[in-house]
Image (cartoon, rainbow, N blue to C red):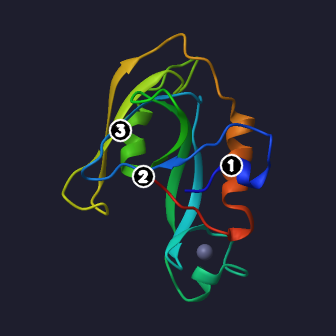
């Protein structure tokens, strides 16, 4: 688990990355209006951001990149803030529920897996909407993600 404040002390509270597993559904309220898409590779036993064919070690050996979406959320289990990883298919099923003025902000989602493997397709459903959710901020989300992937050091999840 990589915490944001390992990269910049005294900046923000620690934010773990949360990925739904087949035996661990994630229920959380989205606290950003939009997610951030990142081209990634599974490389060297962790997720790295693709930095383009010229300098990317994974592209260099012919690996395909996979687009993933990251968004800040508040866990319904313990009320803690975290960054959720959402796959494109799951993102699509959330996306059409977005509100005109608030985007994804305030949506309560449940993320899971469609089969007994952590690599099986991610499922997502919107179960509730919380209109008074306070906003994490897009700029802050961008900074958090950038720092997490900084220097292609990779991303570990819980
Ligand atoms: Zn690459």
The residue tagged 1 is 4
User: Going from the N terminus, do you reach mark 1 or mark 3 first?
Assistant: 1
Left or right relative to 18: residue 146? right
Answer with the quarter of the image where residue 97 lies: top left
Q: Nearer the viewer, residue 8 or 125?
A: 8
Q: Are marks 1 and 3 in contact (CB under 8 Å)?
A: no
| Residue drawn at 67 percent across, 78 percent down | 56
Crowding at dot 2, Cα within 10 Å, few <14 / some 14-19 / many 20+, comes out as: some
Q: Secondary structure at mark 2?
A: loop
Where residue 148 appears, x then y in whole percent?
Answer: 67, 56
The residue tagged 3 is 93
The residue tagged 2 is 87
Q: Are marks 1 and 2 in contact (CB under 8 Å)?
A: no
Q: Nearer the viewer, mark 1 or mark 3?
A: 1
Answer with the quarter of the image where residue 124 lies: top left
Left or right relative to 140: residue 97? left
Q: Is residue 117 above or below residue 52?
A: above
User: Ligand 1 quadrant?
Assistant: bottom right
Q: Nearer the viewer, residue 22 or 130?
A: 22
Crowding at dot 1, Cα within 10 Å, few <14 / some 14-19 / many 20+, comes out as: many
Where residue 101 appears, x then y in whole percent?
Answer: 58, 17
Q: Is residue 108 above or below residue 25?
A: above
The Cα–Cα distance between marks 1 and 3, rounded to whole angstroms, is 28 Å
């Amino acid at each position: 688990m990589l915490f944001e404040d390992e990269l910049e002390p005294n900046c923000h509270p620690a934010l773990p990355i949360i990925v739904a597993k087949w035996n661990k559904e994630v229920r959380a309220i989205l606290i950003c209006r939009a997610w951030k898409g990142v081209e990634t590779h599974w490389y060297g036993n962790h997720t790295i951001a693709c930095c383009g064919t010229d300098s990317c070690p994974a592209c260099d050996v012919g690996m395909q990149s996979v687009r993933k979406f990251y968004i800040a959320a508040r866990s319904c289990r313990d009320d803690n803030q975290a960054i959720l990883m959402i796959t494109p298919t799951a993102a699509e099923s959330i996306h059409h529920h977005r509100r005109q003025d608030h985007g994804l902000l305030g949506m309560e989602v449940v993320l899971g897996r469609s089969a007994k493997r952590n690599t099986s397709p991610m499922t997502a459903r919107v179960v509730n909407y919380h209109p008074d959710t306070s906003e994490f901020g897009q700029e802050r989300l961008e900074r958090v993600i950038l720092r997490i992937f900084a220097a292609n050091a990779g991303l570990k999840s819980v």
